[in-house]
Image (cartoon, helix red, strand yellow):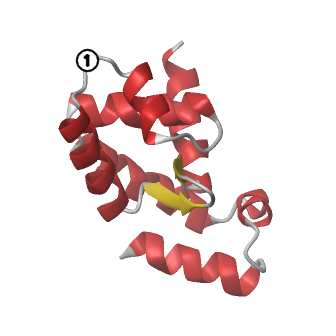
Amino acid sequence: MALNMIASLIQDVCQGSTTAFLNMNTIVVHQLDHVLAERIQWLSSTELDVLQTLAQANQPVSREWLQATLDSVSGSQLLEILLSLERRCLLEILSEETVRFALAPIVQKYVGQQILSRL
């Protein structure tokens, strides 16, 4: 999977710094945009809503916060969407004191750019 390969590259070449990787502005970053576009095009409208909400939050959020923000999405539907996004390597599940959800930094940047380009 392309995203796992990119993650390994970031870890090995950039010492885990996604910022350093993105600043390299290599062809790999442009290829990643293509991979992300392909992945995102197959998302349902509700999955896209969750993705955009996470991008706009710009920080890890709880499932409860997402549920309150996306009031048209049922609890079970939200859980299915979160697991679907995580399987597609678009979402990171962070365990601290509580479980939080965030977009992978590269996905965050891509989705943010897509949102801005629509304005």
Residue 116 appears at what percent x and percent y?
Answer: 58, 22
Residue 113 appears at what percent x and percent y?
Answer: 58, 33
Q: Residues within 10 Å of mark 1 (few under 14, many from 20)?
A: few
Specify whether 20 is left or right of 11. Answer: right
Kindly identify the amino acid type of the residue bearing the numbered disc 1: Ser
Q: Residue at x 35, y 27 (%)?
A: 49
Query: Tag 1, which secondary structure?
Result: loop
Q: Quadrant of the C terminus?
A: top right
Q: Quadrant of the N terminus?
A: bottom left
Q: Nearer the viewer, residue 33 or 16?
A: 16
Q: Residue at x 48, y 52 (%)?
A: 33
Quadrant of the image occupied by residue 12:
bottom right
**Furthest-bottom residue in view?**
12
Residue 52 appears at what percent x and percent y?
Answer: 45, 30
Q: Residue at x 64, y 36 (%)?
A: 58
Q: Which residue is mark 1?
A: 72
Task: Decide: is 98 above or below 109.
Answer: below
Total numbered circles = 1
Q: Nearer the viewer, residue 24 or 18?
A: 18
